[in-house]
Image (cartoon, grey):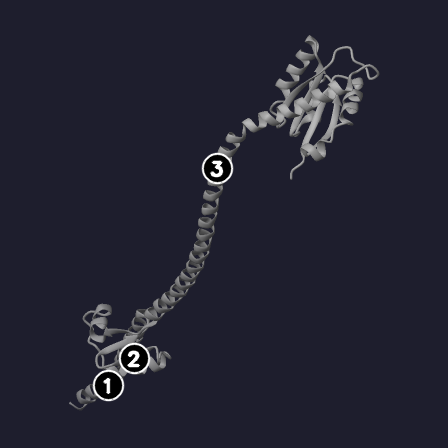
Amino acid sequence: MTIVDVRILVEGASDVEVISKALQGLALGSEYNITISSIIPTTNVEIAKSAAAGADLLIIATDADRVGRELAERLFNELSEMVGHIERMKIPIGHDLEHIDVELVRKELKNALVRAGLKTLQRVPEYMELRRDYLDLKGKFEELQKEKEELLKRLEELEAKYNEVQDELKRLEVENSRLNEMLKKRPKVYDLKKKWDELFPGVELPEEELFSKAVKTLNLAGKVIVGQGYIYAEDEKLVEDLLKTVYLSLKLREEEEVEVIREGIEEIIPEIDSGGEGGESEG
């Protein structure tokens, strides 16, 4: 069972002695499950706040005169929000330890405790209502906690699935990139005559054998294939380089042939000239 923490505020040190004397005849622990944790002699509100804060029950014991009533009222107003319950207790006026009626003080103290208990009982319905509200909120909280745990579990599953999808997406991106590179490098087919006419319009297409020789000369074997009127190549630039090389070789061959013819003509002309001169002299 929970021990009730009771603290008593008095006006001065002499009141502490009176209250202590009265408490000696009370079995508060065994009868009421109460412990008097402190008797505080002060009229200072701030000191009272510091000493009384957190008590289950605070008894304000002051003289039964106007000054005592005003002090009790002021302390009640200032401390009511800081303790569980406040009860006032009157101490006979003009008391001292030798002449005080300790039994009367003891009776006042017990009455204060009983009043506090009865007032607390009046709050039982309110407490029960609060308890019902608490249990209702507790049940809702447990449901929400369960939903939260389920959502967290679901979130973990979704995160794991998301990571799997991300990994698969990255794999597909890499695969797609690889396939695109393969497509770029895939040999393309070009019509030999059409390509030749684009580059060298009006020039007759030479025999395919000449293109095949050019492929070997340029070390394009495996990269460029010529046959059946078509060229197979990974890059169009290779095709153009090949055709330009063939065209250049044709031009060089033509120039060589022209040079040979020129040289032949040059050799023949002197002979013709010599023959003509000889004929005239004979005539």
Secondary element at image label 1: helix
Question: From the image, which quarter does the C terminus lie in?
Answer: bottom left
Q: CA distance from mark 3 to mark 2?
A: 91 Å
Q: Which sits in the foreground, 92 or 134?
A: 92
Give the labeled residue for mark 3. 132
Seen from the viewer's position, the closer of residues 261 and 3 is 3
Mark nearer the N terminus (3 vs 2): 3
State whether residue 47 appears in this view: no
Which residue bears the numbered disc 1? 268
**Element type at marker 2?**
strand
Residue sitting farthest toward the left: 283
Q: Nearer the viewer, mark 2 or mark 1?
A: 2
Residue 248 on image: x %, y %: 30, 74
Residue 100 in view, yes or no:
yes
Tell me residue 40's x, y (percent).
Answer: 74, 23
Residue to which mark 2 is pinned: 225
Image location of residue 132, percent across then percent down: 48, 37
Toward which corner of the image does residue 35 lie, by quadrant?
A: top right
Query: Which numbered marker is on residue 281?
Result: none
In the rendered image, the vertical position of residue 209 relative to residue 157, given as above or below: below
Residue shown at 74% from the left, 19% from the top: 105
Mark 3 or mark 2: which is in front?
A: 3
Q: Amino acid at mark 3?
A: Arg
Q: Local crowd at mark 2 within 10 Å, few (<14), some, or many (≥20)?
A: some
Residue 161 located left or right of residue 187: right
Q: Quadrant of the N terminus?
A: top right
Circle 3: element type: helix
From the viewer's perspective, is the residue at label 3 or at label 1 nearer?
A: 3
